Image: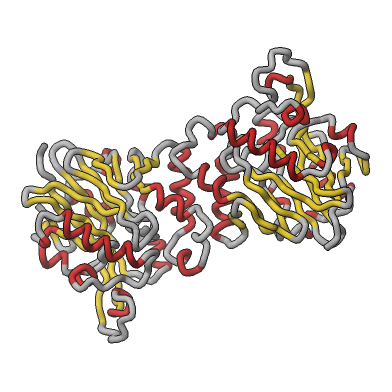
Amino acid sequence: MKPYKIYTLYYGARPSDTSQYLEGDTEAKPITAAYYMWLATNGEEHVIIDLGYNREVGSRRDRQIIAEPAELFDRVKVDPKTVKHAIVTHLHWDHSGNYALFPNARFYLQEKEMAFWNSSEIADWKAAVEEDDLIAMVRLHFNGRLGLCQPVQEIVPGITVHHVGGHTRGIQVVEVATEKGTAVVASDAVKLYRNLAENRPSPKTQHVPEMMEGFKLVRSLAAAEELVLPGHDVTVMDRLPQVADNVVVAG
Amino acid sequence: MQPYRIYVMQYARRQTNSGVFFLGDTHNTPMEMAYYMWAIRNEERTVVVDLGFTRAVGEARGRTWVAEPAARLETLGIDPKQVNDVILTHMHYDHVGNYALFPNASFWVQDDEMAFWTGRHAATEMFRHSMEVDDVVALVRLNYDRRLRFVRGSQELFPGIAVHRVGGHTAGMQIVTVATASGTAVLASDASHHYGNIERRHVFPTLNNIPEMLDAFDTIERCAGDKRLIVPGHDPDVLKRFPLVEEGLAVVE
């Protein structure tokens, strides 16, 4: 099994501040919220992690697109049609939008995540989900194209999902074997490096104790801080080596 | 609390055989399967139970159409737009098709049922063939619209009308008990397709859990005021055992 490299694809952005990301923050320091998709590839196997948002939903929700996802794939010379595995960490609108880009992929979601968004508990939380994305997942499921994952499940050799819960009840992080050791695509289980470094949950978390346990799991898996990929931290683009415009690499 | 009448409304049928009704049966005896919806009424309220399938789905699956559900409701003087509550005994294609008939209703389903059909086994062929994906999608959207109401286990939804999870046929199958003038009636739906299933304790071949199916027979008998007040889900004989309002429409009271 060849180790993977993980490309962080920076496609969207919006001006924000730290109070939106750190529970109890009163400083409200301005930061750019980055919107990412991640591509784990070892030359043979390409696995996309998270599906971003598309232009129509982005503009409705007042987020910019700074580079089209399809264009970013071009820059790393991977054809989205050759992606066979698409991991969806959770069903929030900015992580589930571009399923149509991957017509030959099998999609992977935690069973708990699918269950939550089809339960009696969605009322307080559903503003963060695009109903049509949820429907798309249901249809993919009945068409045999959705893997509803167990809490710990290997997707391909070297890439394993882990249910952590917290941010949403069914969010999963992705463990990836790289040459530099185990990397973790944490997505919104760790929105900024600071959440992990300061052991601080993000606001509007569905289950805070689960999030805190999630931090412990991420720390125990990742070989180094540089091998943790947070969900929305723009400083990733400075910390990691650039391979193309809006694309950096880990591992 | 005024006792209810239960109206049994046939909308379709098909010719089939005993192997379809009884697990392991090899006699191949010709048998007819009836398709029903039910309406529970007293002066205060009307509650519909199950939604059949649409004509289009019926045609695609080779079922013989008998009457429009809307026409049956009209005969009974029920305006579907005024129906506030529909109970879904389970989510198979022949029980969830006509949600569009009831634009102002809330739909009541067991937690376990929705969880199963959005869970990892739903797409397995042995389960999937009993489903219309568009129906599942419709219920997901109804949930988003706050029109799907969830029940866990047993719950009295209205005075004299209660649901009880039995499982068995599907993960979240529920039966309905109704207070009628003759005592408690039980809408068994697919917990007993035919009188023969419950009378001979012979399970139906499409199933999720056999022990639960067997326990369901006991639960139904225990809840019913009298065995004659048990209403199976697909038996044409129901229309012979209760008085008729018109052909294909019987009343239990």
- Front residue of this view, candidates A46 and A215: A215
Q: Residue at x 82, y 56 (%)?
A: A79
| Quadrant of the image containing the N terminus of chain A | bottom right
Q: Residue at x 65, y 22 (%)?
A: A23
- Front residue of this view, candidates B182 and A11: B182
- Residue A35 placed where, x, y %? 75, 35
Examine the rendered structure and indicate whether residue B228 appears above or below residue A64. Answer: below
Examine the rendered structure and indicate whether residue A250 appears above or below residue A200. Answer: below
In the displayed orientation, state which residue is furthest to the bottom.
B27
- Residue A69 placed where, x, y %? 79, 44
Dividing the picture into quarters, in which one does residue A210 lie?
A: top right
Dividing the picture into quarters, in which one does residue A130 lie?
A: top right
**Left or right for B120, reference B66:** right
**Left or right for A69, reference B191:** right
Q: Residue at x 21, y 42 (%)?
A: B46
Residue B70 in view (yes/no): yes
- Front residue of this view, candidates B26 and A222: A222
- Front residue of this view, candidates B169 and B69: B169
State how many labels appear. Answer: 0
In the displayed orientation, state which residue is furthest to the top.
A27
**Left or right for B13, reference B113:** left
- Residue A68 placed where, x, y %? 80, 41
Q: Residue at x 32, y 79 (%)?
A: B19
Colour setup of the view: secondary structure
Residue B97 in view (yes/no): no
- Residue A219 placed where, x, y %? 74, 39
